């Protein structure tokens, strides 16, 4: 409904330095990147915050590059840029696969990976990818930079360790060995929220299997499935691993699906990962 | 704020958080771009920003200062897609049509059927079942080719 | 067919240029000066009495309207008189409108807080347990017991279909302007004269003081058949009370929450068959969930019941149905209007029978399909224009159906079909009661069509102009179509029931025939120069030989039927239980395709909606309310969800339709859901409830 803009404020920093100073001195401020999530709530009149920080023009948050060993992805990178990036296709194809399944072209042109992570939905499509890739979240504030492993980033439903005065500026991905795998099960073939979303890596460096597996929409946060990984990596049977994953996740019934469906399909997806990711 | 809309510079007074959709429809009087859902699902509000298709219901006007915005009006009725949508049934009730055509312009000159389906997956149509939209886009491609070969040759309208 | 100048050709859509350039003006595009924006305050409980209303905002600049401001009768005039325009002391469903606020400032309007307390009573959400039936219908043919006794096998089945939301991409919206001592209502609507009548009753105004003008409408599908009378009533009340134009446009969420949807249905079949597949007896029971007020439930039930036994011959049929009240938002018109629900059931049931007997589903239908001279369940003798066998055989051949039934066995792929029909026009004596009129005017500017039929995407303006041009022998481009404005056009009846071509188009054909004879050998322009202009008006005449008895529900239910057969191939993913339709073929027999491309457009669009009905579109009801009233969560097909579609149109003319045309608007949505369910059955997944979501398919497979 119209009429929800009045009384709201948008601060427009020109540089990243300005932005973090504003966060420290003029907060609370909600950062705005591509707006593909926040503006839905704004349009519906359910968005409570009234003060926003425009990140869209901050070039420091853009760009994909290799720095040393790490693949560095700026927070403001859109899904379209991810899909077009040669570096991502080379090093992190499962991220391009995830980006392809988000919304349609219009959403892909504006939605950003930083926004996906900051929005902290348990259904975020890139989140299992970052978890399975052992990504590091790079946070910047006026006090400096800190790095948090993605696996420690979320602490609860839509909650993270990021402070109110911190901005996600990018992600650092170490080299990913082994075959990458991604599958999203949505409510339809495009423009769909995930009912369940999985990213995995079958890493067989030094001859031992060290599978990494992460899943979204099955718990209050996206999950790294360490127990299921251990089972698969230690040579347990697939059937056992499928039992373990069903206990490791905590899916619910919601508007889109049921806990039972998510449990069964989670087990089936582990099976599909197991058979497809191990192929040479 | 200064915006470039359909190659013209306009000064808008709207609050920086105003949706680009509302700035276009109300301040600029360009009502060709439609609102179907307000949540970025239907694509009826699609415009081009710097050549890329976006849902204008999800864009704060502050973020498109300095960008080139193109709406359906900017095609001036002469884009091959527009004629093709009429000739081949791509438009029925017409409410999704401006957004659909704008998204289709971003498909490039020679999209395959698969590319059309993927490129238009963010535009919902309730009337056509999409089949006539594909035919319209493919036909406009043929017309574009004929034109560029052309010297005034008109591609024959399919019946 | 001889090549004609207009009919049978894909002439350019009359308003096509406007639609592809952004020039077409939908209601929200039109600027009105001095406008007030309106907001509807709605019930948040499903049943109860209104205890207290408190306004927690500064009321400066606000206009507030409640039921006490209604000058006429507080009803939404339609069929029954049970639905108030604004609630008085009780509410019967969540989202029931209670009062209206208006302000020129949308921010203040959105921020205004109204607190309403209720004394809640126990709501009923179970249509079968309801104590109130809006309508019951009984169809009886032959002697059921005799038919059952003749049977070798008796097959039972129960089928359920949920709500479906019309999801026109343009939400409901109107602007009411107080003028001339009355009101002019502009809006997105299908039936200007329905709104006209509703407003005269609500506002206690004589007919000439109310004017209704249809603006370019972004989809209707029945969702703008009766509902606009409600939203127009609200805007008009606000306009009359405030003295200013009142603009009321719903956003998507309110539209989904508060407006009508397809009636959910529970259909039970008990069918007697011979071993060779011949149907001997059909016993059918139908329950439709009408929601809180009657609206069109009686008529939806009627069409549903008449189609419930499918396009088959059977000497003994007993069909009973009722539309009942639940404390949910009232359900109403949606393309197909009862027939999608009941034909889903009979067609899914036919495959159950085929399985039981070990007969190919196509052969089973061949054995039982109506042929010219057979009688329907209401005793109507179908004529030469019955094409059930032709569409069935054509579809079977084109898809190699019987071969694939064998080769797909044991795979994740299934192929299924449905055979269906759809009556055009209002049921029984309905067209006589409507007494529709159409006018054709010769003016200084040329020939102008004046009808209340609305263009809502299906091509009304174009198709009507083709009929007139062809009959007059003048170019299509010289025929103009008037805006659907009650000040200018006669009452041609509503734009529903697949009647706009067959009934109203025929009226225009007759108008043009008379005009042609009066013009003699003159062109319209030459005649006008010599003699001035004139208007020809024709009124509906029932074709000879049509007899219908509303008491016994026997006789000729419709002047003509269309016939169709869908074949769909579906692939089931064993990992995710998702069913993907991978190919869709349909053969539709529609009398005559006035505009082949527009006809194909109706078939492809309606089929796509049918696929959504089958697989994707679920209205999640919680506590009597649609919980997923957002496009994010109410799932309609995108491009990537829609399979390639192959459409074949056959023509078996109907004598009393214009150039032989029957109707085509609704029939396409009747077939896909059972074809999909039958394909799933073939793939080993037995579901009897739609939408057949992955969650349901999983349950069926485990």
Image (cartoon, rainbow, N blue to C red):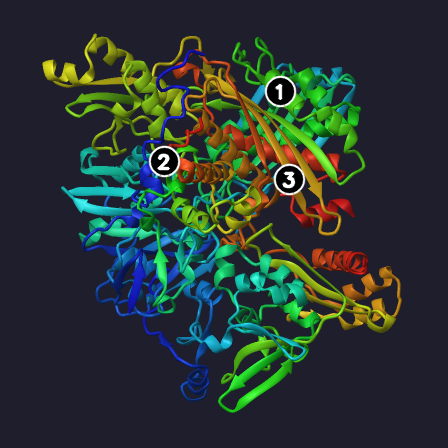
Image position of B94 with respect to C100: above or below: above
Q: Nearer the viewer, residue B43 or C59?
A: B43
Callouts 3 and 1 in the same chain? yes
Q: Is label 2 in a helix, a strand or a loop? A: loop
Q: Is label 3 in a helix, a strand or a loop? A: strand
Q: Position of residue B9 (x, y in %)?
A: 27, 62
Say which label, 3 or 1, has the lower sequence index: 1
Callouts 1 and 2 in the same chain? no
Q: Quadrant of residue A71?
A: bottom right
**What chain does mark 2 sit on?**
B
Q: Position of residue A279 (x, y in %)?
A: 81, 58
Task: Say which of marks 2 and 3 sits in front.
Answer: 2
Alpha carbon of mark 2 to alpha carbon of mark 3: how far?
Answer: 44 Å
Q: Position of residue B32 (x, y in %)?
A: 33, 49
In the rendered structure, the answer to whether residue C516 lies left or right of residue A189 reads: left
Residue at point 66% right, 63% down?
A93
In the rendered structure, the answer to whether residue C409 lies left or right of residue C105 reads: right
Q: Is label 1 in a helix, a strand or a loop? A: helix
Quadrant (top left, top right, bottom left, bottom right) of the N terminus of chain A:
bottom left
In the rendered structure, the answer to whether residue A20 lies left or right of residue C402 reads: left
Q: Which residue is mark 3?
A: C581
Disc 3 crowd rating (10 Å Cα; few below 14, some 14-19, many 20+) is many
Residue at point 63% right, 17% down?
C369
Residue at point 52% right, 66% down?
A78
Alpha carbon of mark 1 to alpha carbon of mark 2: how far?
Answer: 44 Å
**What chain does mark 3 sit on?**
C
Q: Which residue is mark 2?
A: B151
Quadrant (top left, top right, bottom left, bottom right) of the C terminus of chain A:
bottom right
Q: Position of residue A236 (x, y in %)?
A: 88, 66
The answer to whether residue C568 shows anywhere in this view is yes
Q: Which mark is residue C394?
A: 1
Q: Nearer the viewer, residue A33 or A26?
A: A33
């Amino acid at each position: 409904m119209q009429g929800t803009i009045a009384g709201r404020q948008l601060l427009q920093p020109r540089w990243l330095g300005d932005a973090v100073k504003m966060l420290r001195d003029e907060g609370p401020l909600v950062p705005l990147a591509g707006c593909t999530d926040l503006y839905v709530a704004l349009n519906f009149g359910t968005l409570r915050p009234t003060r926003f920080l425009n990140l869209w023009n901050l070039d420091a948050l853009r760009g994909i590059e290799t720095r040393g060993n790490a693949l560095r992805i700026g927070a403001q990178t859109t899904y379209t840029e991810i899909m077009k990036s040669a570096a991502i296709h080379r090093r992190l194809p499962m991220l391009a696969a995830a980006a392809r399944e988000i919304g349609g072209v219009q959403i892909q042109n504006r939605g950003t990976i930083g926004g996906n992570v900051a929005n902290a939905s348990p259904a975020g499509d890139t989140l299992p990818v970052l978890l399975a890739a052992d990504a590091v979240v790079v946070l910047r504030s006026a006090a400096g930079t800190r790095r948090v492993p993605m696996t420690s980033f979320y602490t609860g439903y839509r909650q993270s360790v990021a402070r109110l005065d911190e901005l996600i500026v990018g992600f650092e991905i170490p080299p990913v060995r082994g075959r990458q795998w991604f599958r999203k099960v949505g409510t339809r073939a495009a423009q769909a929220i995930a009912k369940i979303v999985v990213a995995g890596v079958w890493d067989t460096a030094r001859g031992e299997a060290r599978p990494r597996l992460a899943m979204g929409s099955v718990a209050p946060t996206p999950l790294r499935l360490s127990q299921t990984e251990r089972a698969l990596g230690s040579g347990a049977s697939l059937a056992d691993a499928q039992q373990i994953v069903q206990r490791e996740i905590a899916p619910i019934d919601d508007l889109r699906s049921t806990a039972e469906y998510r449990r069964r399909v989670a087990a089936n997806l582990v099976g599909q990962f197991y058979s497809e990711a191990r192929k040479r | 704020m200064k915006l470039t809309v359909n190659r013209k510079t306009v000064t808008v007074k709207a609050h920086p958080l105003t949706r680009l959709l509302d700035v276009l429809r109300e301040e600029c009087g360009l009502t060709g771009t439609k609102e179907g859902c307000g949540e970025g699902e239907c694509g009826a509000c699609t415009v081009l920003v710097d050549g890329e298709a976006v849902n204008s219901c999800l864009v704060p006007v502050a973020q498109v200062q300095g960008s080139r915005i193109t709406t359906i009006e900017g095609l001036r009725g002469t884009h091959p897609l527009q004629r093709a949508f009429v000739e081949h049934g791509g438009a029925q009730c017409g409410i999704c049509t401006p957004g659909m055509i704008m998204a289709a312009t971003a498909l490039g000159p020679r999209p395959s059927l698969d590319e059309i389906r993927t490129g238009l997956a963010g535009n919902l149509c309730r009337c056509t079942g999409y089949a006539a939209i594909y035919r319209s886009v493919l036909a406009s491609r043929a017309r574009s080719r004929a034109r560029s070969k052309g010297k005034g040759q008109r591609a024959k309208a399919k019946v | 067919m001889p090549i004609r100048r207009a009919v049978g050709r894909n002439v350019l859509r009359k308003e096509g240029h406007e639609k592809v350039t952004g020039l077409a003006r939908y209601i929200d595009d039109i600027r009105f000066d001095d406008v007030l924006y309106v907001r509807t305050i709605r019930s948040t409980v499903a049943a109860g009495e209104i205890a207290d209303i408190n306004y927690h905002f500064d009321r400066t600049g606000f206009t507030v309207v409640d039921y006490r401001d209604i000058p006429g009768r507080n009803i939404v005039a339609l069929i029954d008189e049970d639905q108030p325009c604004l609630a008085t002391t009780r509410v019967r469903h969540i989202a029931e409108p209670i009062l209206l606020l208006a302000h020129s400032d949308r921010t203040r309007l959105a921020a205004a807080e109204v607190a309403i307390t209720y004394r809640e009573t126990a709501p009923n959400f179970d249509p079968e347990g309801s104590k109130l039936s809006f309508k019951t219908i009984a169809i009886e043919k032959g002697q059921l017991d005799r038919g059952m006794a003749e049977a070798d096998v008796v097959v039972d089945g129960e089928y359920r279909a949920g709500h479906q939301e019309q999801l026109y991409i343009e939400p409901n919206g109107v602007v009411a302007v107080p003028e001339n001592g009355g009101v002019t209502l502009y809006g997105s609507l299908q039936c200007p004269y329905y709104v006209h009548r509703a407003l005269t009753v609500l506002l206690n105004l004589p007919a000439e003081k109310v004017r209704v003008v249809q603006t370019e409408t972004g989809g209707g599908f029945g969702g703008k058949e009766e509902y606009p009378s409600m939203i127009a009533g609200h805007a008009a009340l606000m306009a009359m009370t405030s003295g200013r134009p009142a603009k009321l446009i719903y956003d998507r969420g309110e539209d989904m929450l508060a407006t009508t949807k397809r009636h959910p249905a529970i259909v039970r079949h008990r069918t007697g068959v011979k071993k060779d597949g011949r149907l001997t007896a059909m016993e059918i029971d139908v329950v439709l969930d009408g929601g809180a007020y009657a609206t069109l439930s009686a008529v939806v039930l009627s069409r549903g019941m008449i189609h419930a036994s499918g396009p088959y011959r059977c000497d003994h049929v007993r069909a009973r149905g009722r539309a009942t009240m639940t404390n949910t938002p009232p359900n109403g018109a949606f393309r197909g209007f009862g027939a999608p629900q009941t034909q889903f059931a009979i067609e899914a049931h036919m495959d159950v029978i085929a399985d039981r007997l070990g007969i190919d589903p196509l052969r089973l239908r061949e054995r039982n399909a109506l042929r010219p001279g057979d009688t329907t369940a209401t005793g109507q003798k179908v004529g030469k224009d019955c094409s059930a066998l032709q569409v069935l055989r054509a579809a079977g051949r084109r898809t190699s159906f019987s071969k694939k039934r064998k080769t797909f066995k044991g795979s994740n792929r299934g192929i299924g079909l449905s055979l269906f029909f759809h009556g055009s026009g209002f049921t029984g004596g309905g067209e006589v009661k409507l007494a529709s009129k159409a006018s054709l005017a010769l003016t200084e500017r040329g020939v102008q069509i004046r009808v209340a039929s609305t263009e809502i995407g299906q091509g009304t303006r174009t198709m009507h102009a083709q009929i007139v041009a062809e009959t007059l022998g003048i170019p299509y481009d010289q025929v103009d179509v008037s805006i659907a404005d009650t000040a200018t056009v006669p009452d041609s009846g509503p734009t529903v029931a697949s009647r706009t071509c067959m009934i109203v188009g025929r009226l225009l054909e007759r108008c043009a025939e008379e005009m042609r004879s009066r013009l003699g050998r003159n062109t319209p322009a030459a005649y006008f120069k010599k003699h001035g202009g004139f208007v020809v008006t024709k009124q509906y005449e029932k074709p000879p030989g049509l007899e219908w008895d509303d008491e016994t529900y026997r006789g000729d239910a419709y002047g003509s039927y269309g016939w169709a057969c869908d074949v769909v191939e579906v692939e089931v993913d064993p990992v995710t239980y998702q069913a993907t339709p991978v190919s869709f073929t349909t053969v539709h027999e529609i009398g005559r395709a006035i505009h082949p491309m527009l006809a194909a457009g109706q078939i492809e669009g309606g089929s796509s909606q049918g696929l959504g009905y089958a697989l994707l579109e679920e209205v999640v009801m919680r506590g009597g309310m649609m919980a997923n009233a957002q496009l994010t969560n109410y799932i309609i097909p995108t491009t990537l969800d829609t399979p390639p579609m192959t459409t074949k149109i056959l023509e078996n003319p109907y004598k009393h339709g214009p150039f032989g045309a029957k109707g085509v608007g609704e029939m396409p949505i009747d077939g896909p859901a059972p074809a999909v369910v039958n394909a799933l059955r073939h793939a080993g997944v037995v579901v009897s409830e739609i939408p057949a979501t992955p969650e349901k398919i999983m349950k069926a497979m485990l």
